[in-house]
Image (spheres, grey):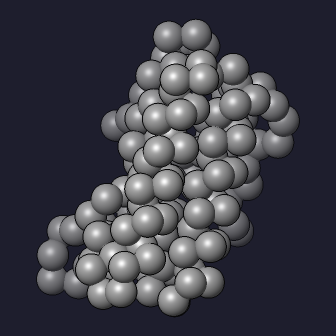
Amino acid sequence: MGLTLPMGNDPQAVRARIEAMEKLLERSFTVPGTNYPIGLDGLIGLIPVVGDVVTTALGAYVIWEARNLGLSKWQLTRMGANVAFDTALGLIPIIGDAADFVFKSNTRNLRILRKHLDKHHPQTRIIEG
């Protein structure tokens, strides 16, 4: 059976969707022979132009979800800057592809979102073990 994500706009559902998206995009695989996680963001980013458009759209989705939770303009701006920087890096041939595996904008944005949720919606906290 596949993973079922909760629907709805409540903070718990949004947190679950964003955490699942971040895991898929940034750390869904491990590089063989290492302990280094990579995700679809880096792999899709290898496709010239189209990959960068797709990963930017996925990053924008995370920001849209954060906006619906009421994050401040400053937090949303920081999240947007992370995605914009990731996109700009991705447009540089070869160097940008390598940078996609190091600069994980979705992980950075999840950190911003978690901080907001932990402060304003503490019942959404997930105990990781």
63 sits to left or right of 6: left
Q: Nearer the viewer, residue 115 or 123?
A: 115
Q: Is residue 7 above or below residue 68?
A: below
80 sits to left or right of 100: right
- x, y (%) of residue 9? 81, 31
Residue at the spot x=51%, y=89% of the render?
48
Q: Quarter-wise, where is residue 10 in the image?
A: top right
Q: Nearer the viewer, residue 41 or 92?
A: 92
Q: Quarter-wise, where is residue 49 in the image?
A: bottom right
80 sits to left or right of 96: right
Quadrant location of the N terminus? Answer: bottom right
Q: Quarter-wise, where is residue 26 in the image?
A: bottom left
- x, y (%) of residue 85? 41, 56
Marker count (numbered): 0
Q: Is residue 28 visible?
A: no
67 sits to left or right of 74: right
- x, y (%) of residue 57? 66, 62
Q: Is residue 52 visible?
A: yes
Q: Is residue 6 above or below residue 54?
A: above
Q: Nearer the viewer, residue 70 or 119?
A: 70
Q: Is residue 94 above or below residue 28?
A: below
Quadrant location of the C terminus? Answer: top left
Residue at the spot x=15%, y=75% of the render?
34
- x, y (%) of residue 119? 50, 10
Residue at the spot x=73%, y=54% of the render?
4
